Amino acid sequence: AQLAPDDALKSFQLAEDVKIELVAAEPLTASPCALAFDERGRLFVAENRGYPNTAEPPQGVIALLEDTDGDGRMDKRTVFADGLTFPNGVMSWRGGVIVTCAPDVLFLRDTDGDGRADERRVLLTGFDATKSTQLRVNAPTLGPDGWIYLAAGLAGGSITCPEHPERAPLKMTADVRFHPDTLVVENVDGRSQYGMSFDEFGRRFICMNRVPVQHVVLSSKWLARNPRLAFSETVQDCNERDVRTGLKGGGDGVKLFPISANLTTADSHAGTFSAACGIHILQGEALGLGYRDCAFSCDPTGNLVHVDKLSGDIATFTAKPLLRGREFVASRDDWFRPVFLAPGPDGGLYIADMYRKVIEHPDYLPEAVRERTDFESGKKLGRIWRVTLKTPLKIPIVREFAGAGMPELVKAMDSQTGWAKATTVRLLLERREAGTAEALVFALDAPATSATQYRRARLLDALGGVDDARLAALLKARDVGIKRAALELAVGRVPPESAARAALVQLDERVDDLWFLQLIALGGVDDWRAFARFAEWSKIRSGDRWVRAAVLSSIGGRDEEFLGALKTQSEFAVVARLFAELRGLDDSSLARKIFERAATEVVQKGLSTGDRQVFARLLGRSTWAAAGGALTAAFAAESDDQARAVVAASLAALDARRAAGVLLAPGAWTASAPGLREAILNALLARRGQLDAVVAAIESGALPVSALSSQRREVFTKHADASIRERAVKLFGVVETDRAAAAERAKAALLLEANAGHGREAFKQLCATCHRFEREGVAVGPDLLDIRNQPKENILFHIVAPDAEIAPAFAAYACEMKDGRGFAGILTSETMASVTLRQPGGVDETVLRADIKSLTALPGSLMPAGLTDALTPQDLADLLAFLKGEK
């Protein structure tokens, strides 16, 4: 049952050194989902009162809360704006607020001082508002570059600017940013579900429901500098996944310590993140040095706020729980629903608590559960809490900047609270007063923290104050914060014979993350010192994929020369790892030498599994004459199934007909695990012109007919070669296409007594190549942990008719390559230059867009219809029992 605010206050369990206080509660606020303080210390609250269902008239509100008596609790409420659909993000800007409320991003301002917004501009529009109200565009956040960033949610859109109808629409594929003055909008890397935060050095962090901390490491613009680079990742999952749950992507759960009695939609998720949101990197010292630069995140289904300690390593971070066996804030109150975190003028961490009986959206609940779930209770309730140190530190606190002049703001950029740091930057950027650039240049020579100096240097550039001479001076600065800013600014803007270019190539910085930035900034610089840096760090850090990506993106156009030079001073494995991610060099003399060496290394005992896989992948780009024997020997000797899958793919890439004789030798299929079987089929079926060997294997009995789904059988029955078609029809017969009739017949399974143990075996044979459940299988398709809450009828229908409903994140694509290969999979990542598809069996294939003939969204699911046609009703009954968790 719901608790009154005073009783809810007693339900909290906190970190030992902090306390929590109530700032506002109903009726002063209801359903708060985002917060922002302005320069006067007033609190703007996005109230998503209509969530989760569409209501008429629209119920969303932007409320303005004030503490008029200075006691720390809000006591005055003004409806700043109402009549909104689902407002879910708010940011102070130029005396008003920027609000995300799909399909629009709005600017609202009160120009007559009555507390209500009388100015309303649609800055951008076209954000998708047709799907779930839960995860739409959100989290407007000012970046260090002076642009405003927006989290994508799970929606896209075709974005336009009403004030500039002449501009072409932007197809939203990820998070976006827009310039607050010009309203130019563009895609950026990363796709946060709800929330976004920058740390003190401008690094952007995002989150997804099961992973609370993700770091946007690279820009795909950087990767595109080398058209031969097949690397499409830009985001690092920072958390350690230490709980076995079978999450999408093959990872495991991030552990939590809830103290409430709540259950998620899948009780298998208990004790792990299932709704991570509101990520916030805490800046400043008001909560003590122990929490500074830590990552805080909410989990409303677990009724808690979590904190991770970030540890940097060259390019990115790991995130590990700061507290042992407990959370920063946890509640025994099942209605406590923290969804957003914000810094306050007093140095406290403010929590938006939607306070609902149910927080989950009906779209993500099984229909049977949805029908009996109360989504209404709590819509008129809501709390805002503040967490501070029990014993406050004696540090200066500035609570408002409304009357501060430009010199005072420049000085206050070195404040000791996160809110003050962010507010000073925002106000200086908004006002753009004459003399600001000069004041910032002067301040860069004064004592200050490196984080402050980084902030000042980036602001100086956002105000147009960094030309070539100034950039050169910043690169030569001793302060690491200034140097970091300078390296970020140097990317792509150091022309030949410039002072900045000279300073960049002369820089010999040994701080790891600055080294990484220098690798990127040196991209395209034709200087022997640049190549020396690339070679040195490739040799030292070749095992780090981000370093490899930085180096390879930077040497575009001179790949062969770089690898040739590197080969004289490094171990072969270094060259192999780098070469494996490049395309278009396979006919070079250097490539032939690399292939020759890889053929001897791939079967060497004592090498790491990772190195063996690298060598095997490389040999798939050679010839059968040069590499077939080595790969055949490796397939026989290899004990790791993932490595065998790589070997199988390389054998088939060389010659699918010959590879079939190795991979489908008598007895090989029955001895292979499900994941390896799927990898073998993926490999052999990729070249449509070489399917006769697979047909022969089926005819001989080496490959059972049941191994091929109805979808795969169509590859043979519709083949261009008449002899293949005729042989296939004899083997497979006619595939039934009426899935509704098949689903009706399958209902017989619902009436049978079931054996869940046998169902596990059926799952391993049929489902494990694309789904993971109870430690079985590979995660390619949707997470099945929620499935136990669905009735058997629903589960059965989706097994028999998988195309009936396809989640957007699991849309399948067919990729046809210019070299004749073809494969299908889930699009897991993409850049302007390359894409990565995850195939059944969990094998990722990264290819250059330039090598793709066509990439087409499939009309149906990657899970083929007819997958269960070979099962008896009893087999289906057993499979359903296993999925439902029956004993």
Image: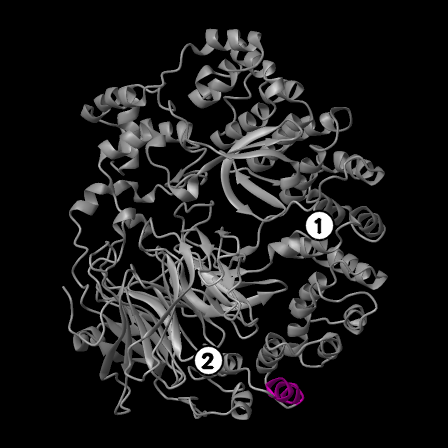
> Which residue carries the number 2 mark?
418
Along the line of sight, the residue nearer the viewer: 250 or 243: 250
Q: Is residue 542 visible?
A: no
Residue at point 55%, 82% (across, down):
432
Q: Amino acid at mark 2?
A: Gly
Q: Is residue 794 visible?
A: yes
Which numbered marker is on residue 188? Answer: none
- Which secondary structure, mark 2? helix
Residue at point 82%, 59% (across, down):
526
Residue 731 lies, with reference to residue 134, above or below; the image says: above
> Which residue carries the number 1 mark?
226
Most prominent secondary structure in the magenta stretch?
Answer: helix
463 horizontally vs 391: left or right? right
Q: Quadrant of the N terminus?
A: bottom left
Residue at point 40%, 55% (across, down):
127
> Which x, y percent locates residue 172?
48, 52
> Which x, y percent locates residue 777?
43, 37
Residue 605 lies, with reference to residue 472, above or below; the image says: above
> Which x, y percent locates residue 53?
23, 54
In the rendered image, the residue lying farthest to the front is 166
First in residue order: circle 2 vs circle 1 = 1
Disc 2 residue crowd, few under 14, some 14–19, many 20+, Cα 10 Å: many
Range of magenta residues: 435-445
Residue at point 35%, 41% (across, down):
784
Along the line of sight, the residue nearer the viewer: 665 or 844: 844
